[in-house]
Amino acid sequence: AQSVTQLDSQVPVFEEAPVELRCNYSSSVSVYLFWYVQYPNQGLQLLLKYLSGSTLVKGINGFEAEFNKSQTSFHLRKPSVHISDTAEYFCAVISTGANNLFFGTGTRLTVIP
Amino acid sequence: EAQVTQNPRYLITVTGKKLTVTCSQNMNHEYMSWYRQDPGLGLRQIYYSMNVEVTDKGDVPEGYKVSRKEKRNFPLILESPSPNQTSLYFCASRRGVTEAFFGQGTRLTVV
């Protein structure tokens, strides 16, 4: 069985400060990993994904994430946040051979002016 | 433009009155799914479909039905809605393990 844990339900951070949103997963097989962002009153859109290859993945809006197989983590980082980054962020996983995109419970990022 | 279209965006209904939320995608994706989003619980999958006439239960299927008669459409049916089905619903489509595209959401209130 697969699962995704986002330990921080809310993360407040000052504008231009760095941020890290944590994601840990569990799966008995290899995985594909994703981060999605949800702006207020909107659907979800893809920030970045890890399918294979380089463990450091760069996405849109200056975000990046690093896949760490030994720690089963896929933390999302940005070196300097903007007000416009205020949103809810979801980590998601698909296990190889499975079909379901399984989501974590989300982290609400609030950027403080 | 590639998109997933859900209708309606907002719906208020009464307990027991059957309703359908429509979902349509224009990307010829094989895989479609329905999620519900509740505070503190993230997105939980209700049903998914791997292709026409192939559907299966997700994590929270009770009280819901789906059908996949055409590749582009995947309606969500609530035969007898109850207040615990008040939620924000999302339809999504994708090809294989590539990016999933989401609709704008349907906010359902059952009173």
Image (cartoon, coloured by chain):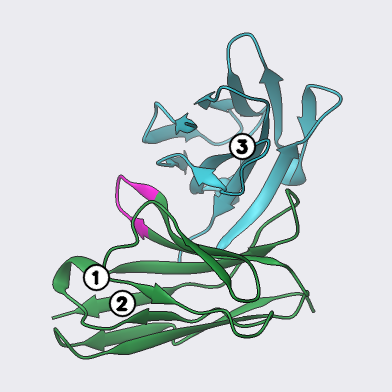
C-alpha gap between disc 3 and disc 2 = 33 Å
Q: Which mark is residue A81?
A: 3
Q: Could you say where residue A18 lies in the image, as x and y percent from the top left?
A: 60, 25
The image quarter containing residue A6 is top left
Query: What residue does disc 2 label?
Result: B108
Amino acid at dot 3: Val
C-alpha gap between disc 1 and disc 2 = 5 Å
Same-chain check, marks 3 and 2: no
> Residue, x 58% and y 17% (percent of image)?
A72
Foreground pick, B78 / B40: B78
Q: Which mark is residue A103?
A: none
Query: What residue does disc 1 label?
Result: B86
Asked if residue A68 lies left or right of residue A6, the reply is right
> Residue, x 75% and y 59% (percent of image)?
B95
Q: Is residue A22 visible?
A: no
- Boundaries of the magenta span: B37-42
Q: Is residue B72 above or below residue A100?
A: below
Residue, far top = A70
Tag 2's secondary structure?
A: strand
The image quarter containing residue A58 is top right
Amino acid at dot 1: Thr
Tell me the shade of chain B: green
